[in-house]
Image: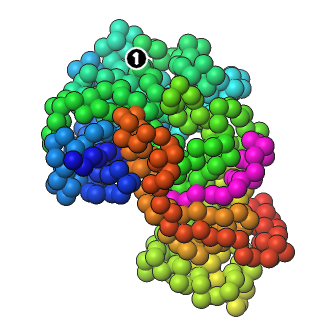
Amino acid sequence: MARYVLAIDQGTTGSTVLLVDEALSVRARGYCEFPQIYPEPGWVEHDPEEIWQSVLKALAQALAEGQPGPDEIVAIGITNQRETTLCIDERGRPLHNAIVWQDRRTADACARLKAAGHEALVRERTGLVLDPYFSGTKMAWLLNTLPGLRAQAESGQARFGTVDTFLIHRLSGGAAWVTDGSNASRTLLFDLHTRAFSDALCQLFGVPKAALPTIVPSQGICAQTRGVPGLRDGIPIAGIAGDQQSALFGQLCHRPGEAKCTYGTGAFLLMQTGERIVPSQRGLVTTLGWQRGGQTTYALEGSAFVAGAMVQWLRDGLGILRSASEIEALARSVPDSGGVVAVPALAGLGAPHWRPEARGLLCGLTRGTTRAHIARAVLEGIALQNCDLLGAMEADAGLRLASLRVDGGAAQNDLLMQLQADLLGVEIVRPKMLETTALGAALLAGLGVGLWPSSEAVAAAWQEDRRFTPQLAASTVQAMKARWADAVKRA
């Protein structure tokens, strides 16, 4: 009998369901988008019922394609958009739309907390910065806005959670209200040192602790399916991780100093730091990676707001590409950028610079500049901003990066990956399976039920696609980095 893990990857714009076999091959895939809701400028919401229906539709597609037997699915793993916040009543009905991680409605509340001198406490306990990105101020906004919600939350009639919590509640027929540490560590309410929701932080944000989910390990059975269309009852839900931590696990970054970069709309870099909590002095955040086998693994995280979105801008804004896939061939048609530097600060600069006022910049233009030079400069800019992030990680952690594992759509661009290897001076390792976010959830779930006996057995099945080794001369790299540093100051 074949044995499969079902991986649910619930993202910002859609839900993916993969059927993964013991050899780590994807045997079936389903995907369904759902609407984005923008009630006011800077506000972003999702209808929780639309999220759930998208998961059910993607599940139905995967089951129809893979045709697994009723007993062949041995576990379910869940990964999710992390900071998005939901509130439901005791019957599991949403009390408000989910407030999405991108939402900025609590910017003023964060500013007031900073002005009152609370950021140092938050940073020390949670590893995070006071920013609307995270869940705590979203919960506070709901409590302060919805009539009667605070009384409901204090009495246990209303509950808060992230998307993983909501999905497990639905998958288990309402039996479980849980989360794991990787998601809890993104709420501003979780103490990295005690690995629990903090009374002091809950009091600071005004969130009743009784309304929060139970924290369970990232690996291990936390619930079982009940009443889910297409699935038998009793399938163990045995893996949970927020999307970026799940990708780190799916890339087999299981030792301190190992790192991954996910190239999507932005670039998301995480470096594993083992059981050591590393406070950042260079604009990164510290986060819990996963909890498994009684051990807790931490990570440093940095995000560049714009990566693949810069290529989309070349296509949609400047019109110099007909499709995003054209950029590699166009950029290869010239040997270098001809002195052009592109800073992808279309949405400001994130870590390690944290300059929201920064704007995108193209400089070094001459009469000889062509669209090919601009295309190559954009790929170089995406790679150079990652050098800033990884340099900060190495300095904070006191660890030297040996190689970088990559995933996401833009990781398919061979030229970008070669430039990244050249500029970092380390090997870039690209796996055959680029959907490593979903793979991480599948691995946690499979390990949680013993489908794979150990991480070593998983590593034996993990398949590499290609390695990119540094080729550029050191003097060339230094000149490119010097031009980049100057351009960043001017952005």
| Colour convention of the picture | rainbow
Magenta includes 391? Answer: yes
Q: Residue at x 46, y 74 (%)?
A: 324
User: Looking at this view, is 165 or 41 the one in front?
Assistant: 165
**Would residue 148 be found to the left or right of residue 379 on screen?**
left
Residue 198's x, y, as percent? 56, 17
Q: Quadrant of the C terminus?
A: bottom right
Residue 216, by quadrant, is top left
Report the span colored magenta.
Answer: 389-407
**Would residue 397 be found to the left or right of residue 125 on screen?**
right
User: Looking at this view, is 81 or 224 the one in front?
Assistant: 224
**Would residue 350 be found to the left or right of residue 208 on screen?**
right
| Residue with the most extreme right position | 475
Q: Is residue 248 visible?
A: yes
> Mark 1 is on which residue type?
Ala
Q: Residue at x 72, y 76 (%)?
A: 471
Judging by the rendered image, the residue that carries numbered circle 1 is: 211
| Residue with the most extreme bottom position | 368
Answer above or below: position of 353 versus 135.
Answer: below
Q: Could you classify mark 1 by the number of other residues whose Cα lies within 10 Å: few (under 14), some (14-19), or many (20 or more)? A: many
Residue 36's x, y, as percent? 34, 49
Secondary element under disc 1, as helix, strand or loop, is helix
Q: Is residue 342 visible?
A: no
Residue 235's x, y, as percent? 25, 34
Q: Residue at x 55, y 74 (%)?
A: 414
Answer above or below: position of 263 versus 277.
Answer: below
User: Looking at this view, is 111 or 368 the one in front?
Assistant: 368
Q: Residue at x 70, y 91 (%)?
A: 368
Residue 294's x, y, as percent? 53, 25
Magenta includes 87? Answer: no
